[in-house]
Image (tube, rainbow, N blue to C red):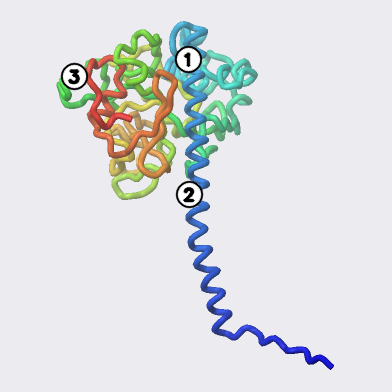
Amino acid sequence: MFSRQKRAAFTLIELLVVIAIIAILIALLVPAVQKVREAAARTQCVNNLKQIALALHGYHDTYKRLPPGSAADEPPFGTSQRSWGSSWMVYILPFVEQAPLYKSITFNGGSGWDNGANATAFQNTVLNIYLCPSSPLTPLSCNSAVANPTMRASYCGIMGATWQLAGIGGFNETRLSNNGNQNSGGGVLFPNSKIKLGAITDGTSNTIVVSEQSNFYKDNNGTPQQWNASGPHGWQMGAADANTPPAYQDRPFNLTTIRYAVNTGGFGNGGCCNPANGISDNMGGNIPLNSAHTGGVNVARADGTVVFMSDSITLLTLMELATRDDGLSLGSDAP
């Protein structure tokens, strides 16, 4: 006869210890998973900007110049004299594998704002290449007369810098208009621009062309606002007239002029169209570069490379990077 020994059950203390160990493991695992997820999202953001940078070069190869940062529907960017044409993101569509979408767009009569012929092209259209995966902003959160809703892009073209202190760093920007926004023509992408790579005399590796506005902007009340260069009328919105800065005096959509450091907040009170500091809804031509990535933003340089730019970069170095021909040596904190 064999006796079968009965196994004792877990005591309450043992059970609590096991639960505590599991809780600790989960607490350790969740941040690790989040870090892996953010690393993947940041890598995808870099890839998006890389494809955008290559598309800008593809456009240059075809047209012997870079696309306009934004444009009115006047030749060579359209066929009429109606304002509020299309943005640089529209013009490079054939070079980001969106040729059918591009061919469906009519470039006249307010192509980026209220030409009803373009409603099908823009309404509910989500282009992932123009969206940072880390962005907490709602993609379909813009309204336009041509289509509602339209997409809010995560990326913006760099118009240049304000150089608002005369002679700062030994350079004084004269291609600058001021209507609340300070709109520069010293960069690569600005209203009705026709810049050739050869005009970037500081060197294409020393000049930034596209970066991020992919996070909430906190106004002077600390309130998160969905303010960026696409808002509130969408990624397709262009320019109001055929001028370039300083003659261009209207709102610059899908573009920004560097006036503040990366991830700066604290201006604007939630109102519309009152850009005393160049920052507001619908008229924010100086909204800072920002992102949900820890510590900075991704930027595409004119040579087609993409780098991560720390939010500790000095404003002077950032202004130098944003200007194509200041002739200054970059600070040691340049990416």
Is 114 left, or right, of 248 in this rendering?
right
Whether residue 305 is visible to the viewer of this picture, yes or no, is yes
Residue 59: percent from left, percent from top: 50, 13
Residue that mark 3 sits on: 171
Kind of residue at disc 1? His
Residue that mark 2 sits on: 35
- Element assignment for label 3: loop
Which residue shows up at 52% across the image and 24% down it?
51
- Up the image or down, 18 lies above or below 162; here it is below
Residue 299's quadrant in the figure?
top left
Real-space CA distance between mark 2 and mark 1, rounded to the nearest whole angstrom: 33 Å
- Give the number of the mark in front: 1 or 3: 1
Q: In front here: 265 or 324?
A: 324
Residue that mark 1 sits on: 57
- Give the number of the mark in front: 2 or 1: 2
Residue 265: percent from left, percent from top: 31, 42
Kind of residue at disc 2? Lys
Q: Quadrant where the N terminus lies? A: bottom right
Residue 170's disc is none
Neighbour tally class for label 2: few under 14, some 14-19, many 20 plus, Cα within 10 Å: few
Task: Check contact, mark 3 vs mark 2: CB within 8 A.
Answer: no
Point out the residue furthest to the right here: 1
Real-space CA distance between mark 3 and mark 2, rounded to the nearest whole angstrom: 41 Å
Real-space CA distance between mark 1 and mark 3, rounded to the nearest whole angstrom: 28 Å
Residue 24: percent from left, percent from top: 49, 67
Is 292 left, or right, of 108 in this rendering?
left
